[in-house]
Amino acid sequence: MATPRTVAFYTLGCKLNYSETSSIGRLFEQAGYAEVPFEAGADVYVVNTCSVTDFADRKCRQIVRRALKYAPEAKVVVVGCYAQLKPEEIAGIPGVDLVLGAAEKFRILDYVDGLSKAPGKGLVQAGEVSEAREFVNAFSFGDRTRSFLKVQDGCDYKCSFCTIPMARGRSRSDTVENVVANARRIAEMGVKEIVLTGVNIGDFGNGTEVIEGVKPKKEALFIDLIRELDKVEGIERFRISSIEPNLCTDEVIAFVAQSQRFVPHFHMPLQSGNDKQLKEMRRRYKRELYADRVRRIKSLMPHACIGVDVIVGFPGEAEQDFLESYRFLNELDISYLHVFTYSERPNTPAIDMEGAVDMEERRRRNTMLTILSEKKRRCFYEQHLGQVREVLFEHSKEPGLLSGFTDNYIRIEAPLAENLVNTIAQVELLSIGSNGLVETAIRQNVGLPLS
């Protein structure tokens, strides 16, 4: 019997990328390939890239070098946002054999089977992003207890710092019926939690195909989708990965508050706590709307976790602007921050703006907000000590331990018990360990009321 061809994957960036990598992996599996660990050496390496920051660009080069270290004769294929934005640049990286754009990546097998390892520049198959018109569904399934389910792709927003519309194209969505069908398939695989992913998932409902010059009529809204998903048997938890504050409506918040399956965890990008920067960033709200969304969530779900994306060092952000943003974030009843240092991205309006902030100053501001985030997270954890909450257990990276998250995204650890992996159990939140995780006592089948 012939040895099957092998493929290995490396994913950079967001949960959406992870869902798409898994779907590409299933295409290879159906074609007879066996997936192997990255370090094992494979016949084909697929690198799924991000291009939100310069770091992601550099990381891509490092991963290609690592792949060739493990398997010098392997075919190396690069897909993802970086591949769409800078295909010729990636094709020039030594060892890269094929670069696929947004419209081509799900037809990867059409190109790989006839690909030969040859010296020189890699082959580029990356059309205009406008060619990425159709929605291609995807979800992850692997060694985790949760699945990332793609429900939307692309973005029609024109934030001045962002390359995503150029990398992924116009906003388009799956249908409610197909998302529900995928959720049921995931449930049959034994997964307990689904994380809904997309570029701008609150914009769900724009249709499965982009038609040039035609503004699609929405047949369904995000609220319609989550109402139907809430009925899916077998999935214990649904989590919304990220939603724009202007699309996180009262209706969505109220639904999550009464849902048995959608957990009390919201991640809303803010980007700046200063209206001056929000305007320059071309965001679709002012900070008061954001504060109102936080108040609304906390009024219905005092225990809810709220995460925030924020950018420091945007052009024109003077020290007083940053401090105003810092004070705004400090006063918000939020749980943690994802802090990004602004980096110049080609072909975005922001790159030509005046008032560039010195890089060292950007790093200093990042450090200040990172420390604030740590304080916010610890405060949020401390508010729940002594309570009993439900945790979905999974293997920890540390030997001899379990880790997991409560419904409201408190990360815990507990002694390893294999029978608890991929199960949900009640735990009492006891204390915060030196590593910042919450230590627990497992209260299986005790029937204690949740706080």
Image (cartoon, rainbow, N blue to C red):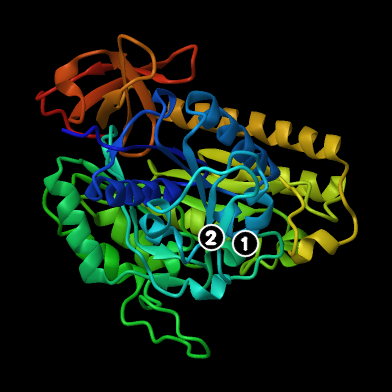
* Front residue of 395 and 94: 94
Pointer 2: residues within 10 angstroms few (<14), some, or many (20+)?
few
Asked if one can make out residue 389 in the rendered structure from this viewpoint, the answer is no
Counting labels gives 2
| Res. 403 image quadrant | top left
**Label 2 amino acid?**
Asp
Q: x%, y% of residue 438?
A: 39, 20
Q: Horizontal and vertical percent for residue 248?
A: 45, 63
| Location of residue 69 in the rendering, given as x and y in whole percent from the top left corner | 54, 25
Instruction: Give how far apart the Cα atoms at labels 2 and 1 are.
Output: 6 Å
Q: Nearer the viewer, residue 135 or 240?
A: 135
Secondary structure at numbered mark 2: helix
Residue bearing the label numbered 1: 288
* CA neighbours of label 1 inside 10 A, class few (<14), some (14 to 19), many (20+): few
Q: Does residue 261 appear left or right of residue 327 in this picture?
A: left
Q: Which residue is mark 2?
A: 292
Secondary structure beneath disc 1?
helix
In the image, taking residue 45 as reference, residue 329 lies left or right, namely right
Q: Quadrant of the N terminus?
A: top left
